[in-house]
Every structure is written in C-alpha cells, then in structure tokens.
Amino acid sequence: MKIRFTGGRVRVRLDDLEAASLARGERLETGVNWPDGGWSLTLDPLSGGVQGTAGHLTVGLKDVLPTLLDPAHEGVTLPGPPRVDVEKDYGPQHE
C-alpha cells in the first residue's frame, strides 16, 4: 500500500495482490510508531465509512468495494473527512 497525506485528503494506492486480499474479505493495515505516538491506516472490506481516532484511520470499503474491484474503474472516493481516494496501481511486478 502506498499512502499520501495532503491537506484534508488521503490517497491510497493498491497493487493487485492487495486488491485480491480485499476481495477475499481481508483487512489491510499499515502504519508507523514512534515514542508517544504514531499513525496507522486500515482498509476494511467488511465495514463502511471513514473513522479516525488518535492517529488511526479506518476506511470502510463495504459499500464501494465492488466498484473498486471492477476493472473498468481506477478507484473510489470516500467523502470522509478526510476525503479518502483508494486507487488501483497495478504494475508489471505481479503479472
């Protein structure tokens, strides 16, 4: 998962193996911790909405997962706040 934070927006880019994990109902989690803090992001295919608390953001994809996985779509946007764009970034590394 590649993540970019900008003002009021989070952009998440997935490779094909990560998208396949979401299709199987598996949560994807990543983050970094440091003394007295840190941040993490979870993509959850079984819940809906965007929720954040104390450095942790959970993005529920239940309602938009079919669109995300559809080959005709590049990605989906969840309004948040923050607004979260989840996009597919399929390179040749797993083909």
Image (cartoon, rainbow, N blue to C red):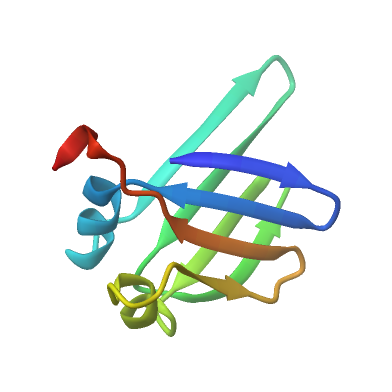
The residue at the far bottom in this view is 63
- x, y percentage for residue 88? 40, 57
Q: Residue at x 43, y 85 (%)?
A: 63
Front residue of this view, candidates 56 and 67? 67
Determine the image quadrant of residue 50.
bottom right
Query: For residue 47, which quarter of the picture?
Result: bottom left
Q: Is residue 74 left or right of residue 22?
A: right
Left or right: 70 as drawn, with respect to 38: left
Between residues 15 and 33, which one lies in front from this camera angle?
15
Q: How many numbered discs?
A: 0
Image coords of residue 85 (percent x, y): 59, 63
44 vs 28: above or below: below
Q: Is residue 26 above or below residue 81?
A: above
Q: Residue at x 31, y 81 (%)?
A: 66
Residue reaching furthest to the right: 7
Query: In the figure, 93 relative to 21: above or below?
Result: above
Q: Nearer the viewer, residue 11 or 27?
A: 11
Q: As drawn, is 43 to the left or to the right of 27? A: right
Q: Nearer the viewer, residue 91 or 68?
A: 91
Q: Residue at x 22, y 66 (%)?
A: 23
Which quarter of the rendering shows the N terminus? top left
Q: Residue 7's x, y, as percent?
A: 86, 51
Q: Position of residue 34 (x, y in %)?
A: 66, 17
Q: Residue at x 61, y 23 (%)?
A: 33
Tell me the quarter of the image containing the C terminus: top left
Q: State which quadrant residue 62 falls in.
A: bottom left
